[in-house]
Amino acid sequence: MSILRVENAEARYEGNVIFENLCLDVIKGKITTIIGPNGCGKSTLLKTMGRILKPKFGKVYLQDQDINTLPTQEIAKRLTLLPQNPIAPGELGVEELISYGRYPHRKNISNLTTEDKEKIEWALEITHTLPYRDRPLGSLSGGQRQKVWLAMALAQDTTVLLLDEPTTYLDLAHQLDVLQIVENLNHHHQCTVVMVLHDINHAARFSHEIVGMRDGKIMATGSPHELITADTLKQIFHIDARIMVDPSNGSPVCFGYESALAEEEFVLHKEKENVAT
Amino acid sequence: MVNKNRVPKMIILTAPLLIVLVIFLSILYGAKSFDPMTVWNAIFHYHADNQDHAIIQSSRVPRALGALLVGAYLAISGALMQGMTRNYLASPSIMGVTDGSVFVITLCMVFIPSLSSYQMIFASMIGSALGAIIVFGFGSLIRNGLSPIRLAIIGTVIGTFLSSLSAAIASYFQVSQNVSFWYNARLHQIDPSMLKLAIPFGVIGIILALYVSKSITILSLGEDISITLGQRTKYIKIISMLAVIFLTGTAVALVGKIGFVGLIIPHMTRFLVGIDYKWVIPCAGIVGGLFLAICDILSRFINYPFETPIGVLTAIIGVPFFLYLIRSKGGKNVV
C-alpha cells in the first residue's frame, strides 16, 4: 500500500526542468532508497515529496491526501525530511536542537510536556546520542552531529522519514551506525523511510525497494536483487559493475566497476584497429 | 537548560533599574551639568520660567528617551534580520534599509515639504521597505546573492547609491541643510512631537518582533528544516520584515541614520544569552537601548564642551567589531 505518492510531477530549478511527468509510489512500512548519478534529480524529488519544493505541475499525496491542501503543521506531524548537510548555530545545545523536533506538536505554550520529554529521551536513546546531550553542537564531530540531526527528526514522531544523503561526509563506522538506526526504526517502529544514497552497496543492504534515476527519469524500481544488476547499473550510472552476493546476508554487492564509456571507446578503438589490419 | 536562561532573565529583570539610571545620568551630565535636585524638580515640580527646567524637559529628557528607543529599535531590527536570513552581517544600515528611509525622506522634503511628523514616519517606513526590497530583490536575482558577504556588498552598493541619489536631489533642490540632519544623526535635536509618535509605532514593531521571536529561532536552523517542522516560513518572514520596517523606519524618522548598532548589538546579545530568539529579541532591545544611551552620554565628553556626533562613537566601536566578524566567521554561513 502506498503511503506517499508522486503523480505526474514536474519540478524546476532556476527555470531548468529537473524532471517532468514523474510518478512514484512509496510503499508503507518499507525502506525505499533513491540512487542515481549527481544531478539526476534525486534530492529534488525528495524535496518535492517533503513539500520543500512545490511541483510546477502534478501532485503529491500523503496518505491519499493532497499535501498542497493539508496544513503544513499537520504534514509535519506525519512526515519529516532531513536535508543534506544541515547547518545550525554551533552554540546550540544538542538537547535543545532535538527539542525543536517537537515544534509541530506544541501548542502556544512554550514548556515541554511529559510526552515531549519522553519523545526527546527516546530519540536520544535510539540514536545513541545520550552521552553528549548537554554539549553544544559545535563541539561534535560530523558523525555525531548527523546523529543529533537524525534525533531531531525522530523527535518529530512521524510515520514517514525522508533522508537526503544521511551518510555523506561520515566515516565508514558512522555511516553504518546511521543506517542501522534507520533500519531499527523501520523494523521496530514501522517508520516508512525514503532516502537518497550514493553508496549502492548500502542501498542494496538496507533497502526493501530501490529507485534508480537518471536525467530526471526513473529508470527502474525493484528489490535490491532486481535492481543491483550489471544491466540496470549500466543504465543508471553508465558503469560496468561486477556484482556478487554477500554470503553473510544475501544482499547483492558491487565489488568493482569500470566506466562503460571507456570500454565502448576501447571497443571502438579495437574495431578501428581490426579494420586497419 | 534551566541554567541557560539565567542570563537573559537577569538582563530583563535588571533592565528597568539600568534604564532609569542611564536616563538619570543622561539628564544630569552634558555641556551644562545639573544637580539631582534640579532634575527632580524639573520633572515633578516643573516651572516654565526656570531655564534649567526648560532645558531638562525639552532637550535632555527627549534625548535620553530617544537614544534608548532608537538603540532598542535598531538592535531588534538587526537581530530579526540576522536570524531570519542566517546572515551574520545583516543589519538595517548594511542592508540598505536606513538609506532607503533617508532617500524617501529626502524626496518628501523636496516635493511635499509640509509633512507632519506622522507622515514623516510613514515616509520613512516606506523608504525602509523600499531599501529592503531593492537589496533582497537583487540578492535573489544574483546566484548565491543571499550569502552573507554578497548580500552585504549588494546592500552597501545599493545603500551608497540611494544616499548619493539623496544627496544629489537634496543639493539640486537646495535642501541639503535639512537633509544632512538625517545623515549625521543628531540626538540633541529630537523633535518631542516625533518622539511621542515614535513610541506607539515602535511598540507595534516590538510586539510583532516578540510575536515571531520563537519562530525566528526555528528559521535560524535553515529554511528547509523550518518548513519540515511545519512552520509557515513566508508568513513569519513577512511579519519579521514588517517589524523591521516599523522599527527602522521610526528610528530613522526620529534621529536619522546611525550605523553599527543594528549589527553589533545582536552579536553581543547572542554572546550573552545564547541563540534562542525568544530571549535574543527582548535582550537585544535592552542592550541596544542602553548601548546607544551610554554612547550618547560619552559623546558629550569626548571633545568637551563640544558634542561628538554619535555616529562617530558607534563607528569607533563598530568598525573593529565588524572586521572581527568577517575574520572569525567569514568562512561559515552560520549566524
Image (cartoon, rainbow, N blue to C red):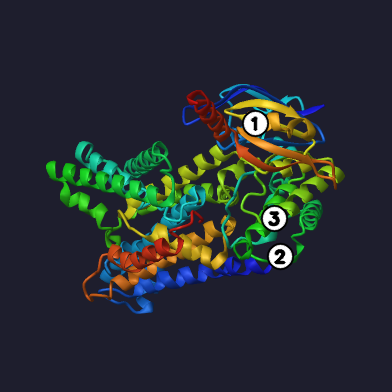
The front one of A90 and A119 is A90
What's under tag 2, amino acid-wise?
A: Tyr
Instruction: Report the amino acid beneath label 1.
Output: Lys
Q: Chain of mark 2?
A: A
Q: Nearer the viewer, residue A39 or B127?
A: A39
| Circle 3: element type | helix
As measured in the structure, the alpha-carbon distance from the residue carrying label 2 to the one carrying label 3 is 21 Å
Taking A146 as reference, is B301 left or right? left
Q: Which mark is residue A181?
A: none
Give the labeled residue for mark 1. A234
Q: Residues within 10 Å of mark 3 (few under 14, many from 20)?
A: few
Task: Identify residue type, mark 3.
Answer: Leu
Numbered mark located on residue A172 in the image = 3
- Examine the image and state in which quarter residue A90 appears: bottom right
The answer to whether any part of residue B250 appears in the image is no
Residue B83 placed where, x, y %? 51, 52
Residue, x 63% and y 62% (percent of image)? A141
Within-10-Å neighbours for mark 1: few <14, some 14–19, many 20+: some
Expressed as whole percent of the image width and height from the top left, the position of residue B193 reads 33, 51
Q: Earlier in the sequence, mark 3 or mark 1?
A: 3
Q: Nearer the viewer, mark 3 or mark 1?
A: 1
Q: Earlier in the sequence, mark 2 or mark 1?
A: 2
The residue drawn where x is 47% and y is 53% is B82
Secondary structure of the residue carrying numbered label 2: helix
Question: Of B166 and A156, which appears nearest the observer?
Answer: A156
Q: Are marks 2 and 1 in contact (CB under 8 Å)?
A: no
